[in-house]
Amino acid sequence: TRILAPKKEALLKLATYVPLVDAPNVRQALFNAGAGQIGNYSSCSFNMHGEGTFMANNKATPYVGAHNALHTENEMRIETILPRYLKHKVIQTLNEAHPYEEVAYDLFPLENEWLTTGLGMIGELPQAMDELAILTKIKSTFNCECIRHTELLNKPIKKIALCGGAGSFLLENAKNAGAQLFITGDFKYHQFFDAEKQLIIADIQFFDAEKQLIIADIGHFESEQYTKEVFFEILTKNFSNFAVRLSQINTNSVKYF
């Protein structure tokens, strides 16, 4: 599985300059604070040797060098990546781990997508399934009283996109990712025609008109109902001294006759 619509403008690049002897400790401290994570890889950084210059005035307490004298130090430029929400934690860690009284660093906003965070998911089944069989399984799994769907493709389904709640805004993402089925809720009537309209305008040769993928609208509540299990797991894992109760109340306001 992977994120259907990865989050944008959520990553920063940090560059800092450290004496060679202290570089390993500073680098590891940054990693421990959450920096340097790229997908399934941790401790990611780029390192370059160079010379830094500075002159300490009489009010300074220099780690190296003398007052009022230009000092040149062999330093390591360390570059690493971090999510924006960890900015203050990482910078605080940098200031604590760095030997200099005044720490020089740069933060750069990145346009890279954060591939492990975002909206919706897409993945492939171990084995392709018949359309009616998979709709039946979806209805059973989500305890749906009905599924509103577009015309069937008349072919086995293997690649599926999913978004809890009102996910119609991710239809183009699902199509571009090659999904054959998109499970979500709250599709409006005319949105069921969006696949057909886009194909005609772009003159793309995928399937016949509306048959590019199946939209399976299972309902807003139905597609989000298992979120409480996610929160239950997070709370019980991180707060072992909390007594967490999982509500059994059905708050779905939509009824079917």
Image (spheres, grey):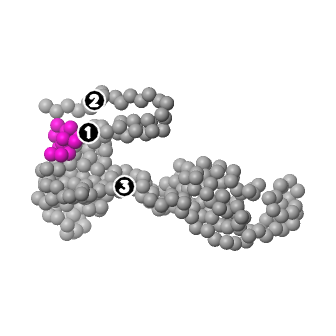
Q: Could you classify mark 2 by the number of other residues whose Cα lies within 10 Å: few (under 14), some (14-19), or many (20 or more)?
A: few
| Left or right, 203 with reference to 14 | left
For the residues labelled 3 and 1, the Cα–Cα distance comes to 20 Å
Whether residues under marks 3 and 2 lie with C-beta atoms below 8 angstroms apart, the answer is: no
Q: Where is mark 3, residue-wise?
A: 3
Q: Position of residue 158 (x, y in %)?
A: 21, 58
Region in magenta: 136-147
Which amino acid, by three-letter code, is at mark 3? Ile
Residue drawn at (70%, 61%) of the image: 22
In the displayed structure, does residue 115 sit left or right of residue 171?
right
Q: Quadrant of the C terminus?
A: top left
In the picture provided, is 184 more to the left or to the right than 42? left
The residue where tag 2 is placed is 250
Mark 3 to mark 2 CA distance (whole Å): 28 Å
Residue furthest out toward the front: 240
Q: What is the crowding at mark 1: few (fewer than 14 residues within 10 Å), some, or many (at least 20)?
A: many
Q: Which label's residue is closer to the chain start, 3 or 2?
A: 3
Reply yes or no: does residue 98 show up in magenta: no
Q: Nearer the viewer, residue 40 or 207?
A: 40
Task: Name the residue beneath numbered marker 1.
Answer: 222
Membership of 146 in magenta stretch: yes
Task: Give the alpha-carbon distance from disc 2 to disc 1, as whole Å.
Answer: 10 Å
Identify the secondary structure beneath mark 3.
Answer: strand
User: Residue 121 appears at what percent x and percent y?
Assistant: 33, 52
